């Protein structure tokens, strides 16, 4: 389908995404604290957001790797 977007995730990124979405949902539902992410988690999720933004046609940040 022309509007479908497919991203392939490694297991660590998929686990990070799941945990982050779960924690945000719990925070919203019950006011539970959100655990600060590790540097590795920030790196993986940042790359995922960049890739998703590209696939959605969003304009890149001047700091995107492919612009250098």
Image: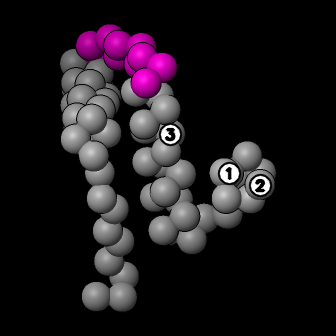
The secondary structure type at the circle numbered 3 is helix
Q: Which residues are magenta?
A: 31-40
What percent of the width, then of the height, locates residue 1? 28, 88
Whichever of callouts 3 and 2 sits on the residue coming sooner in the sequence is 3
The secondary structure type at the circle numbered 2 is loop
Viewer-proximal residue among 12 and 62:
12
Label 3 packing within 10 angstroms: few (<14), some (14-19), many (20+) = few
Q: What separation in Å lies between label 2 and label 1 (alpha carbons)?
A: 7 Å
Tell me if label 2 and label 1 are in contact, CB under 8 Å. Answer: yes
What percent of the width, then of the height, locates residue 8? 30, 59
Residue where numbered disc 2 is placed: 68
Question: For this view, does 25 lie left or right of residue 5?
Answer: left
Q: What separation in Å lies between label 3 and label 2 (alpha carbons)?
A: 18 Å
- Does residue 25 appear anywhere in the picture? no
Quarter of the figure with residue 14? top left
Residue where numbered disc 1 is placed: 64
Residue displayed at 60% across by 64% down: 58
Quarter of the figure with residue 27? top left
Tell me if label 3 and label 1 are in contact, CB under 8 Å. Answer: no
Whichever of callouts 3 and 1 sits on the residue coming sooner in the sequence is 3
Residue where numbered disc 3 is placed: 46
Q: How would you classify the magenta stretch by its main secondary structure? A: loop
Q: How is the image coloured?
A: one colour
Label 1 packing within 10 angstroms: few (<14), some (14-19), many (20+) = few
């Amino acid at each position: 389908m022309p509007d479908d977007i497919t991203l392939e995730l490694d297991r660590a990124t998929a686990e990070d995404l799941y945990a982050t979405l779960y924690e945000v949902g719990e925070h919203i539902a019950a006011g539970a604290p959100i655990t600060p992410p590790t540097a590795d988690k920030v790196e993986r999720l940042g790359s995922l957001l960049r890739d998703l933004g590209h696939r959605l046609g969003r304009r890149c940040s001047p700091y995107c790797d492919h612009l250098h």
